Image (cartoon, rainbow, N blue to C red):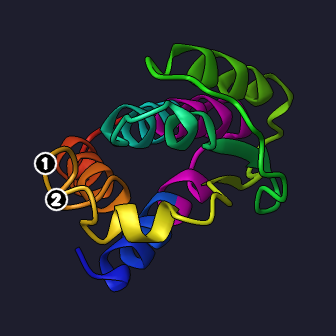
Amino acid sequence: MPLQNFEAFKLDVNDFCKRLPPKLAVKATKKIAADALTGVVFATPVKTGRARGSWQLDLGQDPEDDPVRLDPTGGVTVASELSKLDGLQPFQSVHIGSNLVYILPLEHGHSEAQAPHGMVAITVARLNAKYAGAKL
């Protein structure tokens, strides 16, 4: 999936949330962010669990850390990172990313057996399908 599709999805979500009352905007943002985070974490190939454990969620800015968290199942990462959504303010952006040095090769299909089409691309496509025209 080209990066333009991700950018279009991000703009659609931002536009949708801006039209909501603050309380509903927070609820919608949390729901989409949770789906996005769980999507990329569980779509990430596993050898040691380092790639799955490297995913981070941050409020208002890109994640800057590179945690060394071995999480083959992804459950610890999802729970830890989703807890950060408790501090979400209305209309605040949520950033999900990984600073792991080999995450881009994985996204571009380096793990042909486990994630030939990446993790982010697949997750954004699923989110687009799930939320297209949906009422959150």
- Residue 86 lies left or right of residue 79; in this view the side is right
Residue that carries the numbered disc 1 in the rendered image:
113
Task: Write the residue at 39% across / 35% down.
Answer: 47
Q: Residue furthest front?
A: 48
Q: Image quarter for residue 44?
A: top left
- Residue 50 lies left or right of residue 69; in this view the side is left
Would you say residue 65 sits in the magenta stretch? no
Q: Image quarter for residue 68?
A: top right
Q: Nearer the viewer's eye, disc 2 or disc 1?
A: 1
Q: Amino acid at mark 1?
A: Ala
Residue 78 versus residue 133: which sits nearer the camera? 78
**SS for tag 1?**
loop
Task: Write the residue at 28% across / 82% down.
Answer: 2
The percent coordinates of residue 69 (x first, y second) are: 69, 30
The stretch in magenta equals: 14-33
The percent coordinates of residue 8 (x first, y second) are: 38, 76
Task: Write the residue at 50% across / 36% down.
Answer: 52
Mark 1 crowd level (few <14, some 14–19, many ≥20, 10 Å Cα): few
Mark 2 crowd level (few <14, some 14–19, many ≥20, 10 Å Cα): some
Residue that carries the numbered disc 2 in the rendered image:
116
The quadrant the N terminus occupies is bottom left
Most prominent secondary structure in the magenta stretch?
helix
Q: Are marks 2 and 1 in contact (CB under 8 Å)?
A: yes
